[in-house]
Amino acid sequence: MNALDLFRLVANAREERGWGRSLRRTVADWYTRRPAFDVAAEILKRPAYGGWTHRDLLRLAHPTPPTPAHNALFQWAADGELGHLATADLLTGELRQVHAYERLKRTADEREAADLVERYSLTHEMAPASWRSSPALWEALLASMSCAEIVACLGELADCGLLAEEGPTAALVVARLIDRRGVRQSGLNAEEIAECRRRYAAHRRALPVVLDALDMAAGLAG
């Protein structure tokens, strides 16, 4: 269960029966029964949903941190910044992506931002809002983005002006969209790709070559 599933579970449960012992235990287990690195990645990818934040869930579930890394992670999720519990070994270990994210929020240097993305394997979901219009950051992110992720982010790629006719980034995007294995592994069906194509086609910077690639992807998805 990822963080989005967790938020949806809590929202549905609260509507049906309120915050009971079973739900509290389920939420606490979500935070404690996996490595701190994995929990941190989920928090970074989905910090909030439907009016809920991880701070809310931690406050209501009161999970007991099983390791020092979990303890420092919960402190960060609750306070919004890395505190005294985040020791140097944790910042280079299980909390390294959190540390990189915090550095990314503070820097104004595009080269440093791209380096943080590449060195710490940050995903597009982890990019702070302040960097989501940066072509340099998206270039760094694209290297590891799957077909499904590229399809979902076409609008943002167009917004920042990264997709230019006959440019190298457009060529990379097209190659990913027409790769049979990548499309099949994405889990997207033809209807989902067609809907993404419809939205992208309405963008003022939509490229015909990308639209054609989306048509091919829909055919490959079956």
Image: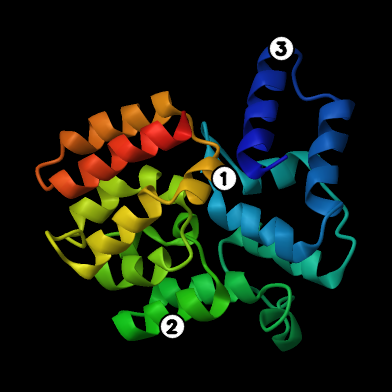
Q: Residues within 10 Å of mark 3 (few under 14, many from 20)?
A: few
Q: Is residue 156 above or below residue 15?
A: below
Name the residue type under label 1: Gln
Q: Nearer the viewer, mark 2 or mark 3?
A: 2
**Residue located beneath label 2 in the image:** 115
Q: Of the residues under marks 2 and 3, which one precedes in the sequence?
A: 3
- Residue on which the image places disc 3: 16
Q: Is residue 91 left or right of residue 153?
A: right
User: Percent from the top left, x then y, of residue 197?
Assistant: 27, 34
Of callouts 2 and 1, the N-terminal one: 2
The residue positioned 43% from the left and 83% from the top of the image is 115
Viewer can see residue 87: yes
Residue at the (23%, 69%) spot, across then down: 168
- Given residues 221 and 169, the one toward you in this image is 221
The answer to which quarter of the image holds residue 19 is: top right
Q: Are marks 2 and 3 in contact (CB under 8 Å)?
A: no
